[in-house]
Image: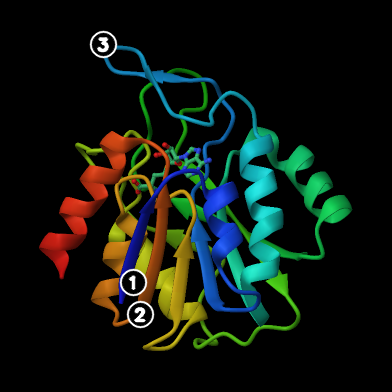
């Protein structure tokens, strides 16, 4: 089952039942106010991190007990985000996983090569593998269709670690649908939400091709 919805996750998640989701795996806008490409296109919700934080807080209700929310996060916002989660949600911050992209980004000084993934636990989840490190190596996407497109192999590693076949995965900030493709390929059910019509159509096409 793949269910994708076009709109704001803060309102659409309201229709999801309590404790119905087995894994939240998401990559929200970081609140960087960045623009991309010649057209200087902005990511919706990137004005500030409060949209993302409100959605993470809402994910607690829909997540089953003893399950986990895995959330990509900007390193610069880590102290602020950790403070918010500790103060305003019941999630326990279990860990911060490093995604090592193998290659450096363009730039100067210490050129960026990693991103972070927050591990937020509801209750006391069990994980399928006993031998997954908190540093995961996966090559960045060379020509992404979405400025923040995440590699499907990395997402599959995260999904396999936290779910079993048939489980329900939610991505409230679906973008180009990478989480949905990973979930589908692993035989998990998927609910994805995306606000931007262009990226919603892109996700729909990708998921149609994958299915
Ligand atoms: C960092 S991107 C996700 C990229 C995705 N991981 C991928 O591989 O393509 C975040 C996405 O959240 C979407 N977004 C922003 N605010 C939203 C909201 N309130 N509800 C749903 N989606 C939203 C943006 O349009 C953007 O596509």
The colour scheme applied to this rendered structure is rainbow
Q: Earlier in the sequence, mark 1 or mark 2?
A: 1
| Sequence order check, earlier mark of 3 and 2 | 3
Q: Is mark 2 within 8 Å of ligand 1?
A: no
- Residue displayed at 27% across by 35% down: 198
Determine whether 168 is above or below 56 in the image: below
Q: Nearer the viewer, residue 122 or 97?
A: 122
Which residue carries the number 1 mark? Answer: 183
Q: Is residue 131 left or right of residue 196?
A: right
Determine crowd level at label 3: few under 14, some 14-19, many 20+ residues with C-alpha closer than 10 A: few
Q: Quadrant of residue 66?
A: bottom right
Total labels drawn: 3
The residue identified by callout 3 is 38
Picture coordinates of residue 1, whole percent (x, y): 30, 77
Quadrant observed for ligand 1 in the rendered image: top left
Q: Return the residue nearer the eye: 18 or 157.
A: 18
Give yes or no for contact between labels 3 and 2 (Cβ–Cβ under 8 Å).
no
> Which quadrant of the structure image shows residue 122?
bottom right
For the residue with label 1, is its CB less than 8 Å from the closest atom of ligand 1?
no
**Which residue is nearer to you in this view: 57 or 108?**
57
> Which of marks 3 and 1 precedes in the sequence?
3
Residue 153 visible (yes or no): no
Where is residue 187 shown, x and y percent of the image? 29, 82
Asked if residue 91 can be seen in this view, the reply is yes
Q: Are marks 1 and 2 in contact (CB under 8 Å)?
A: yes
Expressed as whole percent of the image width and height from the top left, the position of residue 118 reads 63, 56
Q: Residue at x 76, y 65 (%)?
A: 91
The quadrant holding residue 192 is bottom left
The secondary structure type at the circle numbered 3 is loop
Q: Which residue is mark 2?
A: 188
């Amino acid at each position: 089952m793949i269910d994708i919805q076009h709109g704001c996750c803060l309102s659409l998640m309201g229709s999801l039942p309590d404790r119905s989701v087995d894994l939240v795996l998401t990559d929200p806008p970081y609140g960087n106010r960045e623009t991309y490409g010649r057209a200087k296109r902005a990511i919706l919700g990137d004005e500030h991190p409060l949209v993302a934080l409100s959605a993470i807080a809402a994910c607690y209700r829909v997540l089953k007990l003893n399950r986990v929310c895995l959330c990509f996060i900007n390193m610069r916002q880590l102290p602020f985000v950790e403070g918010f989660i500790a103060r305003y949600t019941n999630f326990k911050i279990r860990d911060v996983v490093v995604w090592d992209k193998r290659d450096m980004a363009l730039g100067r000084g210490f050129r960026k090569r990693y991103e972070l993934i927050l591990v937020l636990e509801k209750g006391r989840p069990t994980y399928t593998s006993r031998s997954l490190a908190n540093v995961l190596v996966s090559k960045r996407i060379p020509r992404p269709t979405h400025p923040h497109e995440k590699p499907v192999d990395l997402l599959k590693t995260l999904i396999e670690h936290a779910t079993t076949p048939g489980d329900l995965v939610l991505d409230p900030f679906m973008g180009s649908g990478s989480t949905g493709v990973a979930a589908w390929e692993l035989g998990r059910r998927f609910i994805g939400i995306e606000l931007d019509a262009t990226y919603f159509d892109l996700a729909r096409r990708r998921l149609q091709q994958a299915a």
